[in-house]
Amino acid sequence: MSKSRVFSLHTSLSLRKILERRKSREALEALLLISVATGLNIVFGYFAAFFAFYLSFFKWDYISPMEFVGLRNYQIIFNDLWKGINGAYYFLAPFYTGLKNILLYTAIVVPTQTILAMILAAFANQKIRGVQFYKVSYFLPAVTSPVIIALIFIWLFMKNGFINYMIQMIVPSFAPDWINDRNYLLYAISMVAIWGTSGHFMVSFLAAMQSISRDVYEAAMLDGAGPIRRFIYITVPLLKPMIVYVVVLGMIGALQMFDLAWVMAGSNGGPGGAGYTMALDIYNEAFINLRPGVAAAKSMFLFVLIFTSTYIFQKKYKVMRQ
Amino acid sequence: MNEATKRNLLKALWIVFVYIILTMFAFIYLSPFIRSFVASFMTWEQASKYPPEWIPHPFTIENYLKLFRLELFPRWIMNSALYAGLIVAGNIIFSSMAGYAFARLEFPGRDALFSALLALLMIPIFVTLVPNYIIIYKLGLIDNIIGLALLSLANVSSIFLMRQYFLSLPQEVFDAARLDGCGPIKAFFYIALPLAKPALGAVAVYQFLGAWNAFLGPLVFLRSPENFTLPVGLSFAFQRSMWTEYTPIIAGSLVAAAPTIILFIGLNKYLIRGIVIQAGKG
Amino acid sequence: MARVLLKNVVKKFGNVVAVNHVNLEVKDREFMILLGPSGCGKSTTLRLIAGLETPDEGEIWIGDRLINDIDPTKRNVAMVFQSYALYPHMTVYQNIEFPLKMSRVPKNERRRRVIEAARFLGIEDLLNRYPKQLSGGQQQRVALARAIVREPEVFLLDEPLSNLDAKLRVKMRFELRHLLHDELKVTTIYVTHDQVEAMTMADRIAVMNQGRIMQIGTPVEVFEKPANMFVAGFIGVPPMNFFYGSLVSRGKELVLDTGGLEINIPNSYTKSLQEYVGREIVMGIRPQEITIHTEPIEYAYPGKIIGYEPLGTELYIHFTIDEKTDYVAVVKQRLAINLGQQIYWRPSPSKLYFFDKKTGNAIY
């Protein structure tokens, strides 16, 4: 009897160890499975991000030794902004120009594409045939490369081009040279962006609308609400989470817009710098001016801009909801 | 006219109105493609006429021929295909493995690590661009498709999608497999992977589209024209100053867009459903 | 020999103690049912035996092997899950074959054993189908086949009948017991929340609540001699009526003083209740052991009808004695009664249960 007790005591002591071994085997296999994916993301994500932050305090040209300059790179940014505010030429204040343009661009693109996507989704969310055809049509631009879209639109935006032809059917004698006129370039890019992404968001909205129970609409109908009031009082409030998602995604995309501007305006921003963006400026700083430290500081600025604007928007939305 | 017929008439009018609006917008979204397609068979002289003409006369494929007379154009197609192939393969392999481990296995720090990966989605590509350029440079892989692909072999979005999919599978199936003698890795190959085909398909399609259309990465990490992918190659080849005619550019754009357009028209139901799932999770 | 033994087993999930010092012995070839409400820890206990969870404390033995540290595969147990957990991407044949393939049984022998198991369960015609092409009953047979093909010493079943429709469930109750107990003669541990299943299938039942085993016994024992108020209230439909009160001595007789009504306690209980005189106790009467009368008779007490449910062959009568508590009687005879009517209810004198109010334990 006492012998078996000793035995069981002994086994329960070694128990923990063996349990740990089994668990640690699972952990080991798990680590094996995640190793490549995690490793790549740690190096190219976290290490790179921290290195960018580090780099933003150094003066460097990729070749000579790095030189610690404290906040000088940030000072360069704020000098640029200061000059820009005081009305310096665009090429003397490139960062200011890029910031100003991208904020205007975001302010045009994000609300327009969101509202357009929502309205189109509302129209498609009816008991009608052929919805799939419309979805595919609206979505097609979203799967096409922005570079290719931009190349095609340069041609469509020519002074004697297709777009002016269509516009003149409504507004005669309005025929700007979109791409070469500094007053119109940014609007042309905005229009292409809206055309390119709204279809994608329309599909998101449509899915969210289709998940709203029909009962709610029928109840509203019995309460005497017509289609427009149903849209305003039922659909829009119930879509709020999707609206936030679409706006946040739209802002993240718009604030770092690069491809369209590169092709439609060129890397120097086109006539009068009208198509210059922060993303172009960071690219130029890093790979044309060869000032990676300044580029890193500017990318930090962009990161903070994106982070705070999306954060504030989400926060505000939540306050609205309460 | 009584109430019922009046209501039916109103309803019919409303449906007609809905169709008009939807069709009008379909025209807006499709017309650039249609207009480009038609014009790609025109001479530049005809394509630049005002008001626009719709029937190619004379019908010509000269634009496409000119394109393939560009020595590097086939090279760029191959490069884009190679890049997209590497990205698709890498994401399928690595994100399914990682997604499975994050969803189904227990190991210390799992949730913290996963949150840390998700947080990377908030960091703009422009922040990591310069450091990654330096890393790839140090590895001697600048101007090399493999070096470029290395950056996106296991995208966080793919890992997230796979993890969500594996989480949605019933726990009991994995319990049964464990009792039947599958360790974590065996269960991955015998159970998880065969069941994950829909999710793997979605990852493959999204990563293909992303890689085929990518511009910034190839622009920065590839240097010599023979290594360019299509978007970069086209953006350089078609700098307006170099061409007196625009129709070959249009033809080139259509050739470059063709794989994604065909893929999308073939798989649209599937793709749109994927978008919906992603949005739902967001 | 495949006795299963749990000694002081504890399993916690965070702060929740799912299994709390469970001691359980399942004899070789015994059909043991773990019965309890959802969340009582019965499924966790099963998963601990299977090796899908590891205990925080205690020991689990199968036969004479301590299996805490043994891999689930090597425990020689098979499990049938509530959802059957068939592999959707494999045919029925591949599903049944899978455990053999994983333990590297040679192909010829695999084939022989799969067909044998399929024939045994009458599903040899379904071998090339996929699970989604099968009915619920067929899927369950496949799950059973996949479990028996391994020739396990211990069979674990987690609510295997709960996904079937009511008719099939009744049929499968008998089939399952026959198959496991009479044909395969294996030790079986079966989890359910359905007391009818437990009563009809089990050799013994372990009633669980809040992670603890409340009672282990044969179906007759747990019904006739419940160890505590939980078991008494959980087993039996409708549940047992409980009358709370203090035990008072009236001369030679004992009565239960409920505050408004004094209920006489037959002399046969006097001896066992002696030490509880003056204390709070609970008297339990099953609804079937109460008769309802419209006229006063001896040993019947007044009550007021507050509801009734005709169920065809029998009638549930809800009555109250204090305008607060709802008691139920089940009567077979037709009875003309109205809501609010005064009736007289008479407990069957030999079928009373008494519990210590403080501990909830039965007094015998």
Image (cartoon, coloured by chain):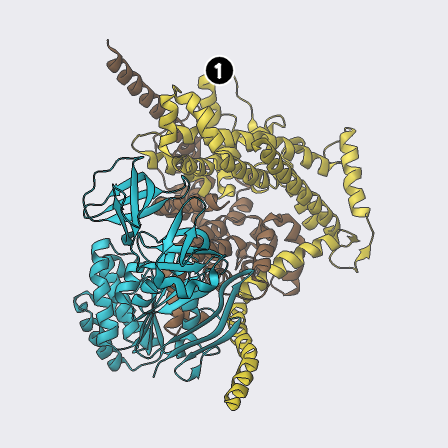
Q: Secondary structure at mark 1?
A: loop
Rendered position, A143 above or below A191: below
Which image quarter holds the C terminus of chain A?
top right
Q: Amino acid at mark 1?
A: Pro
Residue that badge 1 annotates: A172
Q: Colour of chain B?
A: brown
Compared across the picture, whether B222 is left or right of C339 comes to: right
Vertical position of residue C203 compared to residue A192: above or below: below
Q: Colour of chain C?
A: cyan
Picture residue at 26% right of the left edge, 18% below the top: B8
The spot of residue A129 in percent (x, y) is 29, 32
Visible residue check, residue B192: no
- In the picture, residue B85 is in which quadrant? bottom left
Q: Residue C318: x percent and y percent?
A: 32, 43
The front one of A231 and A22 is A22
Residue C321 % position (x, y):
38, 42
